[in-house]
Image (cartoon, rainbow, N blue to C red):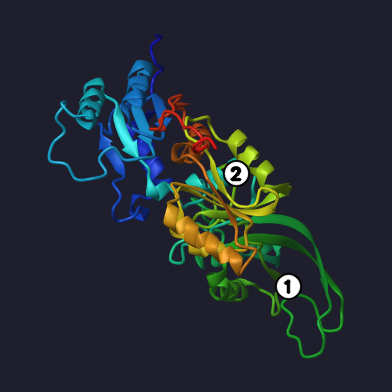
Amino acid sequence: MPQPPAADHTVGSVTDLLDSWYPPERADSWDAVGTVCGDPATPARRLLLAVDPVRQVVDEALAWQADLLVVHHPLLLRAVHGVAATTPKGRVVHDLVRAGVALHVCHTNADSPAGGVSESLALALGLTDLRPIDPDQDHTDQTEAMDKLVVFVPHEAVQAVATAITDAGAGAIGDYDRCTFSSTGTGSFRPLPGAEPAVGAVGRVEQVPETRLETVLARHLRGPVVAAMRAAHPYEEPAFDLVELADPGPHAADGQAGARGAGRVGHLPEPLRLADFTRQVVAALPATPSALRVAGDPDRWVTRVAVCGGAGDFLLDQVRATGVDVYVTSDLRHHPVSEFLEHAAQDPSTPAVVDVPHMAAEWTWLPRLAHRLKSATTVDVRVSSAVTDPWTGHLPMIGPAH
């Protein structure tokens, strides 16, 4: 195998990037996320992505000479007192450490944000206009509400006004500050009786060379910035525009937008019968030996869809209140689904339910994560080819012959 290229990144710099996208503190309290093994200072040239840190995936990482293996499911979810190589998990740890391959986990911290697992599943199914089923009320990926200030200033005062408004906090965009734009033109005005003009005379039309100065500001800074502009401007009555900017939605990978929260609700481009929709789901997900299960009338029309990557029966009550036509998730249990469908007797709009293989639903995140990493780094990123669904086959329950 050819030698890997020189590294521009370390294991630590890549995992820091992952943690900025999927903060570990956002994981559920019972979860075990973050770096399991590996030296942050090790050069990172090759990165393998997978759902599960199982033997097949580890063998693929070693054969490819990966420096970092990033998985969705934790290797050591429950507390252990040792990692002896006599156990399957212990052998994984020993082999990774011996080969110098780091292991990093993004689990429940990657489920709910923009660019996360549930959003990826929704996009894989072709849904649009996404929003969470259960929005996170105390933390979203929403950018702060912004305003745009445009003020017209005589040329000689532009620097003073620009300094004043940026000192007050205007002009901050991401990792940059004091951002402004200027263009030139001619201002025209006539002072009326009672005015005390800095330029011109009462009753006479004046035309003055002026600069159009533009910047943006966080909406909560509106008062201080406008006050600073007025104080620095030489005119008695400055001409300015203050415009509320449209909310671009949360910052997300690949330009997708959606607030942080559990699951996603979206729309199909065109309505489908449930039977046709389930075939579309099968086509969108990777092949596994497991089966897709459906509860609902195959002829009902589907327009609005709710999804949740991974085990999603905890959202059944919220889903019923969203007015969707079908809910797609994994690991649904008999009693919760039975109770959920009982509501259909009183409410025919109760959604149908589609249960898909757990591994297949969460796999949809990996190609999107790979694209995001390739856009942000020079690391060679690969999605594992391993099918890590633990089931090896299924048979329809046809019952005894009659």
Q: Position of residue 112 (x, y in %)?
A: 46, 52
Circle on res. 239 = 1
Q: Position of residue 261 (x, y in %)?
A: 48, 58
Mark 2 / mark 1, whichever is N-terminal: 2
Name the residue: 39% across, 50% down.
Answer: 109
Which residue extends farthest front?
A: 402
The answer to whether residue 303 of the structure is visible from this angle is: yes
Badge 1 crowding class, 10 Å Cα cut-off, few under 14, some 14 to 19, many 20 or more, is: some
- Foreground of the two, 392 or 177: 392
Real-space CA distance between mark 2 and mark 1, rounded to the nearest whole angstrom: 46 Å
Horizontally, is 111 left or right of 197 in the view? left
Name the residue: 26% across, 37% down.
Answer: 36
- Foreground of the two, 396 or 275: 396
Name the residue: 69% across, 80% down.
Answer: 236
Tell me the element at label 2.
Answer: helix
> Which corner quadrant holds the N terminus?
top left
In this view, the mark in front (2 or 1): 2
The residue identified by callout 2 is: 123
Horizontally, is 219 left or right of 273 in the view? left
Which residue extends farthest bottom?
A: 194
Three-letter amino acid code at disc 2? Answer: Leu
Query: Please, is residue 200 above or below residue 192 in the view?
Result: above
> Which corner quadrant holds the C terminus?
top right
- Foreground of the two, 197 or 48: 48
Q: Position of residue 274 (x, y in %)?
A: 66, 47
Q: Are marks 2 and 1 in contact (CB under 8 Å)?
A: no
Query: Please, is residue 324 above or below residue 393 in the view?
Result: below
- Foreground of the two, 8 or 161: 8
Three-letter amino acid code at disc 1? Answer: Ala
